[in-house]
Image (spheres, coloured by chain):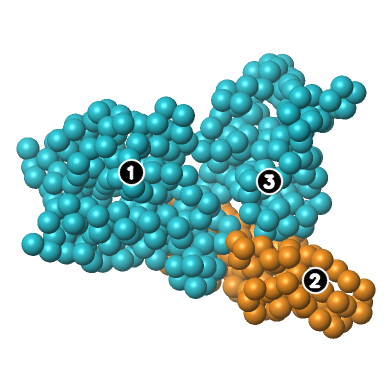
Amino acid sequence: MKRRELVIVGGGPAGMAAALAARAAGVEDVLLLERDQHLGGILNQCIHPGFGLHHFKEELTGPEYADRFAALVHADPGIEVSLRSFVVKLGKDRELSYLRPGAMEDIQAGAVILATGCRERTREMIPIPGSRPAGVFPAGLAQKMVNMEGWIPGREAVIVGSGDIGLIMARRMALEGVAVKAVIEIQKTSRGLVRNVVQCLEDFGIPLRFQHRLTAIHGADRVEKVSVVRVDDDFKDIPGTAFEIACDTVLVSVGLIPENELLEMAGGAVDRRTNTPVADEVNLTSLPGVFACGNACKVYDLADSVTRDSELAGRMAAKYLGVPA
Amino acid sequence: MKRVMTCIECPQGCRLEIEADGSRVISVTGHKCKRGDKYARQETEAPLRTLTTSVLTRGLELKMLPVRTSRPIPKDKLFDAMRAVKTIVVTSPVKTGSVVAENFLGLGADLVACRPLDKL
């Protein structure tokens, strides 16, 4: 089994920041594993501006923010980047197996940083009754389709949830000529940034309905309409307030869940409710020498904050490895 | 005439109060930095937005290339810009910052690549 000093799983903003910070702290050998064909992770589909205001003191798009770090990572001879590489096994003593095109590699890592990001919560997790037609997408998946694959998911859309991804997708779809009929939010306020409510909804005249919820999705093969009702402060439906919106697409933007399957596999403690590592401090896990940073550790609002905390994770790993000796 | 708006320059989202006579700004309050003052004046006189979108590629690593306008453009030109973007297909490799279409709306704004893309 090959030995590597530090193995980082995930080449998004968290993994790249951790790799660079670990190198700056004196770690000599970093292996950065990324399952996609490029570094950057979710930033590659976040083509809107708003990144880098803290870290670079200028406003960048997601791909531009990623590219700044990717250029530094690729230029560093102490960081080996392995793309199309998917970790399939992690043990409690940091033995790790990954698949890359044409090979399965087994490695003994001195320290491991999990920078695996998060997944979207789905329709099934906020039970919306009704039929199961085509046209219901998690908002982030729709974002990838529109921004990276060039597919428009529908012509008339309703968005469930007013988190930042939902708001940003409302604008994106509107720009692409989709009629965005409404954003439906069960709470009294948006979980997203105020600037996104302004520049994504108000700019395009998209109504945001607070204290409303979807009671059903209708449609045989394709979504045909949704039923909506107003709720009171206890989230109870208010009688006589139900109405319908005709649409062929529903985007669901109801939050993110950290992805920590590898940590679980290794026997690390994971909070059942939030899927975050159980530990006393940010970036730590219950396993010595195994760190988790970025959205795998907790869901962040800003990529800049992911960078800041993940740099700390890189330094924590260096310290664990006894670097500098 | 008093107007209230939310600054969109950064995630803080300051609540700005603008005293204006039509589109002529008299005073701005509520901003925590100088970008807020500039935004309030610009937004009252002639709102500008940076457009970000993706353009089709042919023969490159990814099907779409993320792009942005090199400078903000008038808000009411966003849909004209989207129509213009739809006529563009990128076929040569680009670096971050490469100009994909020069002065593509006649407004002095270029369309610029937001990431590098190589040949397939």
**Chain for mark 3?**
A
Could you tell me which residue is drawn at 49 percent across and 73 percent down?
A: A57
Quarter of the image for the C terminus of chain A: give it. Answer: bottom left
Q: Earlier in the sequence, mark 1 or mark 3?
A: 3
* Label 1 – label 2 distance at C-alpha: 43 Å
In the picture of the structure, the residue carrying the numbered disc 1 is A280
**Chain for mark 2?**
B
In the picture of the structure, the residue carrying the numbered disc 3 is A190
The x and y percentages for residue A319 are: 18, 56
Q: Quadrant of residue B55?
A: bottom right
Instruction: Establish if A163 lies above or below A62.
Output: above
Q: Which mark is residue B17?
A: 2
Could you tell me which residue is drawn at 19 percent across and 44 percent down?
A: A289
Q: Are marks 3 and 2 on the same chain?
A: no
- Which chain is drawn using cyan? A
- Residue A197 or residue A325, whichever sits in front: A325
